[in-house]
Image (spheres, rainbow, N blue to C red):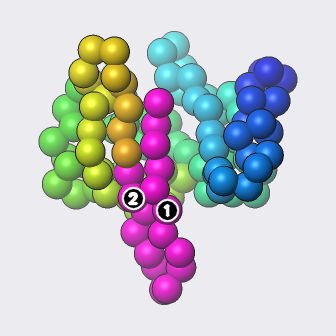
């Protein structure tokens, strides 16, 4: 997974990206690469399952969590042919900053 770690490092290099994770989900859900000591490194298989599952109605209504961080769906193209992206916004807790999350 060294190549994925290098890719994560390149995403973080200019400071624009604050957090990143690459997960495998087809055979077995696992973290392939992530930014150490950040929220997304703690992503759980169930959270990935919600993101890639066919029934997205629950997270449109209730939001979802990524590494325990509560998020809401902004626009969604996850199931459109050729798109496969979802944009999320994190929810603030106790005045913490919020972030937009894009999943290519």
The tag earlier along the polypeptide, 1 or 2, is: 2
User: Which residue is depicted at the point 52% across and 43% down?
Assistant: 44
> Residue 80 vs residue 48: left or right?
left
**Residue 103 at x, y = what percent?**
46, 37
**Mark 1 touching mark 2, by CB under 8 A?**
yes
Q: Which residues are magenta?
A: 88-104
Separation (CA) of disc 1 from disc 2: 6 Å
User: Which residue is depicted at the point 38% across and 32% down?
Assistant: 85
**Between 78 and 53, the one nearer to me in the picture:** 78
**Residue 55 at x, y = what percent?**
19, 32
| Residue 42 appears in view | no
User: Which residue is depicted at the point 22% across and 57% down?
Assistant: 62
| Residue 10 appears in view | yes
Residue tagged by mark 2?
A: 89
Q: Residue furthest bottom?
A: 94
When the figure is inspected, residue 21 is found, relative to residue 73, above or below; the finding is above
Residue tagged by mark 1?
A: 99
The stretch drawn in magenta includes residue 43: no
- Quarter of the image that includes the N terminus: top right
**Residue 74 at x, y = what percent?**
29, 52
């Amino acid at each position: 997974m060294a190549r994925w770690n290098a890719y994560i490092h390149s995403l973080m290099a200019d400071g624009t990206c604050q957090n990143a994770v690459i997960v495998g989900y087809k055979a077995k859900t696992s973290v392939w690469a992530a930014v150490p000591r950040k929220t997304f490194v703690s992503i759980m298989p169930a959270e990935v399952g919600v993101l890639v599952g066919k029934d997205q109605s629950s997270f449109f209504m209730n939001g979802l969590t990524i590494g325990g961080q509560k998020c809401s769906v902004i626009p969604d193209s996850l199931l459109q042919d050729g798109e496969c992206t979802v944009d999320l916004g994190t929810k603030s807790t106790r005045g913490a900053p919020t972030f937009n999350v894009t999943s290519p």
